[in-house]
Amino acid sequence: APLNVTCGAEFVQKSKTPPLNFEEEETDSSSSSSSWHCSVDGDADRVVFWYFNNNRNFRVLDGDKIATLLVDFLHSELASSAAKSSNLRVGVVQTAYANGSSTKYLRQRGVEVRFAKTGVKHLHHAAKQHFDVGVYFEANGHGTVLFSDAFRSAVTTPRLTAFAALANQVVGDALADALLVAAVLKLTNRDLPAWDAAYEDLPSLMLKVCVADRSALVTNDDDTRLVRPAPLQARIDDLVAQCGPDARAFVRPSGTEDLVRVYAEAATPAQATALANQVALAVFDLADGRGER
């Protein structure tokens, strides 16, 4: 059968449903929140975790949740290690698609967050360039933790040394990442619901708008804002401001088709849907939309 069809990390993360081959009787016997699972994709560079809570709701712990778990552990371990590790720069690199709740959670805990263009190669470069301990994950579970030479010289504690040895320094590695997550949960005496409780994702929605020429839209260095056309970015800013303090929206052109991807999130599903639709209409009107408005 084809790889990643109705299964795999990205399917689970986007559809918010278990893999098709997870049979209903398994759901019945594994519905306790103490039971947990992970899904990897066909070439094993992405991983997400999932479980059924006590209300039998399906819950996904995606790449954002993995990043927060791992950086929390690393911060705690570094704080209790030798003083010479105090100058090490620890941070997380996210894309514009990272849920705003994860960014808020990290910043409230004093973690430096940087944004990079969409794509693992951009995340990897930023993590290596800016941090001694750089954590990066896309929402679909593709990511890893990078450690600098300064870290390896300064830190010799067994846990951190073992962590750095397991983390793949070249590419996202679903098996290594799954082992890191399992180790951190064991060492911190947590299960998936306790990990999941760190924060709740804001509701979000993604849409697509066909345009005459995608090259007419140019984003900034991290895809969070448009450089041009300026009137469209101004309109997006107005719409976001009207939607409340938790609202956020951005648009970015496809790399392969004449269409624009719209992302919006807000405090409620209804607000996120309304904001996404309004931004999509703004794209259609101000970026020469094609097809039905």
Image (cartoon, rainbow, N blue to C red):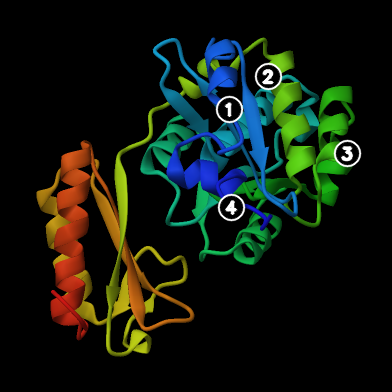
Residue assigned mark 1: 23
Residue assigned mark 4: 5
Circle 1 SS class: loop
Q: Is residue 290 left or right of residue 181?
A: left
Residue depth check, mark 3 versus mark 1: number of the one nearer the observer: 1
Circle 4 SS class: loop
> Which of 226 and 282 lies nearest the eye of the viewer?
282
Q: Amino acid at mark 2?
A: Leu
Distance between mark 3 and mark 4 Cα atoms:
33 Å
Residue assigned mark 2: 185
Picture coordinates of residue 145, whole percent (x, y): 72, 45
Task: Please determine whether, in this image, residue 57 is positioned above or below residue 227.
Answer: above
> Which of 58 and 286 lies nearest the eye of the viewer?
58
> Which of 290 and 87 lies nearest the eye of the viewer?
290
Pointers 1 and 2 in contact (C-beta within 8 Å): no
Q: Quadrant of residue 127?
A: bottom right
Which is more N-terminal, label 4 or label 3? 4
| Mark 2, other Cα within 10 Å: few <14 / some 14–19 / many ≥20 | some
Circle 3 SS class: helix
Q: Amino acid at mark 1?
A: Glu
Image quarter where the N terminus lies is bottom right
Q: Amino acid at mark 4?
A: Val
Q: Amino acid at mark 3?
A: Ala
Distance between mark 3 and mark 2 Cα atoms:
18 Å
